[in-house]
């Protein structure tokens, strides 16, 4: 018991000298069990009393406060007594320090108090009320489900106004509560059983600490409300703590660093096996079975020349340990691709050996061309223009070449024709260029219109997914859309900023 003996001795010597003081401090009990509620009452007699502001006692937080007041008249002299009650729940031995109370402008001090806290023993088999903890097995593997029952027993003639059961919390176990309360009887006792499923997270010889129940009874109130007409309106609840037994478990490790225990099957399916270029194929992976399904990890899929987007795992329970784990993956590509076989390894509860289950590979055919070949058309057009400008090559023969002299009139005519041809060629080149640009805009405009007209976040998400790696603007938009679609988010996507990115290209 860690007590400051020096302070206690000093205050013990001072107490007789302070007998005249009109203040006092009192504990509801000096020896309690761990977690029992204790009440510290500070009392002072006077017309004007100022109590200290107390938020904690020896690092134990105050759980509640209340005030009391009484007035007495003796030989015509009126005296007022005021009290303030501080409730707290200690877990170890402590010293309640001295406190200063101001009474009619004068500071008075209380004496310190000692409080002893003991570890509770399990209830006796003959007690009127009992709390028992039991498990279906004391030896298990990491991740293997263990069923725990917490049973409250009481004799028929024992009544409490309120029963609060603490939820079991164990440091190295993941705990799930089974919904529903089972009521019954055992010998002379009425029983209420709460069921939980434990999933060990670590190996070793582990202790399940004793949970407890708080049993409350109403105490008769004081003052105006202590009247049958008002019932128990002024009553205060008095609490008693009832502890269960501790349990020891032997938890064995899984081989090969495995984390999942149970019996499972796996299946992969797609919504289509033929898709247009840059349109998503939706893949679903289902793992069905019994075990610690919450510990199954997310699949990571990598496919060459494809953009892959994976959702988080979704668990659909059909029982405490049985259910289906589903992961959805969207895949976008501009060419044929194969979804590879995916595997999942766990510790099989039937064979008590590691077991690997796999999906079958899935072939996906991609049809259509992803983009219009605008640039090659321009190159071909320029090639045609260039060929029209090159002089025609004449064949070399052995026959003599006859050179005719041109008259000045012929030269002028050829000059005019050449000038007109040059002007026409320039106009034609400009017209073709404008037509190509117009064709490019016509190509882009429908896609931008699709962005503007996308009604849902999912529609917009599918439109932008093929461009995931093109720019940070697209990545940021996809991240916001992901939160909205799969995490019930309310992110706002700036569509004009997204459209600006495509217009700049």
Image (spheres, rainbow, N blue to C red):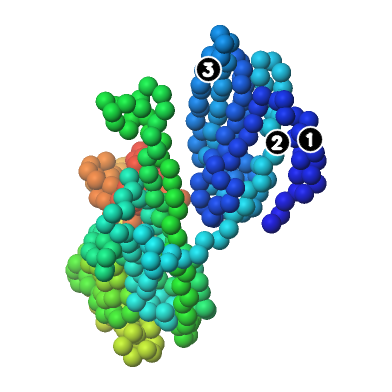
First of labels 1, 2 by sequence position? 1
**In the rendering, at what x and y percent does residue 82 appear?**
56, 23
Closer-to-camera residue (216/137)? 216
Give the mark, 1 or 3, whose residue is nearer the N terminus. 1
Q: Residue at x 56, y 22 (%)?
A: 81
Residue 385 coordinates in the image, percent (x, y): 33, 55
Which residue position is annotated with label 3? Answer: 72
- Residue 330 appears in the figure: no
In the shown orientation, is residue 58 left or right of residue 329? Answer: right
Q: Nearer the viewer, residue 175 or 93?
A: 93
Compare residues 442 and 335 and report the one nearer the observer.
Answer: 335
Would you place residue 481 above or below residue 295 in this image? above
Could you tell me if the residues under marks 1 and 2 are in contact, i.e. CB atoms within 8 Å?
yes
| Callout 3–callout 2 Cβ contact below 8 Å | no
Q: Secondary structure at mark 3?
A: strand
| Mark 1 or 3: the one toward you | 3
Per the model, the C-alpha gap separating discs 3 and 2 is: 25 Å
Q: Is residue 281 above or below residue 76?
A: below
- The structure residue drawn at horizontal position 49% and vertical position 30%, both measured from the top left corner, is 66
Q: In the rendering, which numbered label is found on residue 14?
A: 1
Location of the N terminus (image quadrant):
bottom right
- In this picture, residue 177 sits left or right of residue 93: left
Of pointers 3 and 2, the one earlier in the residue sequence? 3
Image side of residue 26 versus residue 149, left or right: right
Q: Residue at x 76, y 40 (%)?
A: 12
SS class, disc 1: helix
Q: In percent of the image, x 37 and y 89: which residue is there? A: 352
> What residue did someone put label 2 on?
111
Helix, strand or loop for disc 2 = loop
């Amino acid at each position: 018991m860690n007590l400051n003996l020096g302070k206690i001795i000093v205050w013990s010597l001072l107490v007789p000298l302070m007998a005249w003081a009109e203040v006092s401090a009192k504990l509801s009990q000096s020896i309690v069990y761990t977690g029992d509620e204790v009440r510290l009452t500070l009392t002072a007699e006077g017309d004007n009393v100022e109590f200290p502001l107390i938020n904690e006692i020896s690092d134990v937080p105050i759980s509640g406060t209340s005030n009391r007041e009484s007035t007495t008249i003796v030989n015509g002299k009126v005296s007022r007594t005021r009290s303030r009650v501080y409730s707290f729940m200690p877990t170890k031995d402590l010293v309640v320090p001295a406190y200063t109370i101001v009474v009619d402008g004068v500071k008075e001090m209380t004496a310190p108090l000692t409080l002893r806290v003991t570890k509770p023993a399990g209830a006796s088999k003959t007690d009127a009320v009992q709390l028992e903890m039991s498990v279906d097995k004391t030896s298990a593997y990491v991740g293997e489900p263990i069923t725990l029952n917490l049973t409250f027993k009481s004799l028929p003639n024992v009544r409490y106004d309120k029963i609060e059961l603490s939820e079991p919390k164990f440091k190295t176990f993941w705990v799930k509560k089974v919904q529903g309360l089972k009521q019954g009887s055992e010998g002379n006792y009425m029983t209420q059983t709460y069921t939980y499923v434990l999933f060990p997270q670590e190996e070793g010889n582990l202790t399940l600490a004793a949970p407890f129940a708080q049993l409350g009874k109403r105490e008769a109130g004081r003052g105006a409300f202590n009247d049958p007409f008002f019932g128990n309106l002024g009553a205060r609840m008095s609490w008693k703590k009832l502890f269960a037994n501790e349990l020891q478990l032997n938890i064995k490790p899984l081989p090969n660093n495995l984390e999942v225990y149970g019996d499972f099957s796996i299946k992969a399916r797609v919504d289509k096996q033929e898709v247009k270029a840059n349109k998503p194929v939706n893949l679903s992976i289902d793992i069905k079975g019994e075990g610690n399904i919450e510990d199954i990890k997310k699949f990571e899929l990598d496919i060459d020349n494809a953009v892959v987007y994976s959702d988080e795992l979704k668990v659909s329970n059909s029982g405490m340990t049985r259910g289906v784990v589903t992961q959805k993956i969207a895949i976008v590509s501009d060419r044929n691709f194969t979804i590879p076989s995916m595997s999942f390894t766990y510790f099989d509860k039937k064979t008590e050996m590691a077991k690997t289950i796999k999906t079958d590979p899935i072939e996906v055919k991609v049809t259509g061309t992803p983009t219009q070949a605008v640039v090659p058309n321009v190159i071909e057009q320029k090639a045609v223009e260039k060929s029209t400008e090159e002089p025609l090559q004449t064949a070399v023969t052995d026959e003599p070449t006859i050179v005719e002299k041109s008259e000045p009139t012929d030269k002028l005519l050829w000059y005019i024709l050449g000038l007109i041809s040059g002007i026409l060629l320039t106009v034609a080149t400009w017209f073709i260029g404008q037509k190509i640009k117009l064709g490019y805009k016509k190509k882009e405009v429908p896609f931008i219109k699709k962005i503007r007209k996308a009604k849902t976040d999912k529609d917009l998400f599918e439109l932008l997914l093929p461009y995931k790696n093109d720019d940070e603007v697209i990545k940021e938009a996809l991240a916001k859309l992901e939160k909205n679609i799969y995490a019930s988010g309310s992110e706002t996507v700036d569509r004009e900023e997204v459209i600006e990115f495509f217009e700049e290209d």
